[in-house]
Image: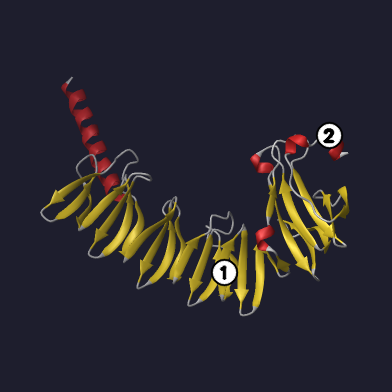
Amino acid sequence: MKLTYYFLLFILSISVANAQEFVSDEIPVKSKLTIKKQEDKFQLINEIGQVIISDIDSLSYYDNSELYIVQKKDNWGIVSKYGKLLIPFEFDRLELLYNYFWIVEQDNKKGLYNVYKGPVLPVEFNEIQFTRKFGQELIVNKSGKYGVFDTKGNVIVPTTYSFIENEWNIMVIKNKDETNYLIGSKIFSDSLVVDKTFEIRGKYPSDTKVYYVLYENEKYGIIDSECNKIIEPKYQDILFQRFIGVKRNNSFIYAKMNNLWGVIDINDKSIISNHYHSIESIDSTLLNNDFFK
């Protein structure tokens, strides 16, 4: 019996020693950290009492992502609640951009980290903006030149332009007197009337499509989000109109040709011929099915 007892004790002591050695390299997943103050400094300690980070000047816990924002000797970094170093302690400043993306700043230059995947953009930019446009999320300024990146660090538009701004679901790209437009992943050089941009909603939110009004040779047409010409530029004016409550079709386009107005659909099919000097919106409940035939 005693032999069995000492054998189990020996095995247990080896297991504890190995566990402590493992902790020193990588904190176990279930080992959450706590904060302990020591004189005028702070420490982050795991569940078995081991000091993971010491000599901390200040720190705060970011509850949304369960992160510790840590300052050591004027340098900032980020540690997970389990002690994993997510952003190294080498930056002058940290700023949450959105979700798990953080702007890091060093010597007045900015970069970007994904706290779960590592660095996204190097620390070389003067400004980093979040656009909320999927695939074109980041507008950057480097030495006075602008470009666009996605959140994986891929270049969408090189940093060679004098100005870039996000407007009405379109990225407006300017270089001296030239204005281009980024639609999807394509740079579109023709003139667009930005404030005429419109959506046509489908049965589900994912079915919604965005369309842009093109102005070419003093005529108006329409392109889609892939830069395909849906309606050739041939109208004197185009106005999009959405009716609320119409079941069969709730979107129309007022189109002017030869100084007369008519109504078309997105496929340029005539709904009302161009016979009228003016067209006004009406209550959609007055419309009947004969209107759509």
* Type of amino acid at the residue the image marks with label 1: Ile
* Type of amino acid at the residue the image marks with label 2: Asn
Determine the residue positioned at 37% across, 66% down. 105
Which residue in the rendered view is the most extreme toward the front? 277
Query: Horizontal and vertical percent for residue 41?
Result: 16, 55
Helix, strand or loop at disc 1?
A: strand
- Depth check: give the residue in front, 243 or 48: 243
Quarter of the N terminus within the rendering: top left
Residue beneath label 2, please? 289
Residue beneath label 1, please? 164
Q: Residues within 10 Å of mark 2 (few under 14, many from 20)?
A: few
Real-space Cα separation, disc 2 to disc 1, in angstroms: 46 Å
Is 229 positioned to the left or the right of 167 in the image? right
Q: Quadrant of residue 48?
A: top left
- Depth check: give the residue in front, 122 or 84: 122
- Depth check: give the residue in front, 134 or 122: 134
Query: Horizontal and vertical percent for residue 52?
Result: 24, 50
Picture layout, residue 164 above or below residue 117: below
Picture layout, residue 140 above or below residue 282: below
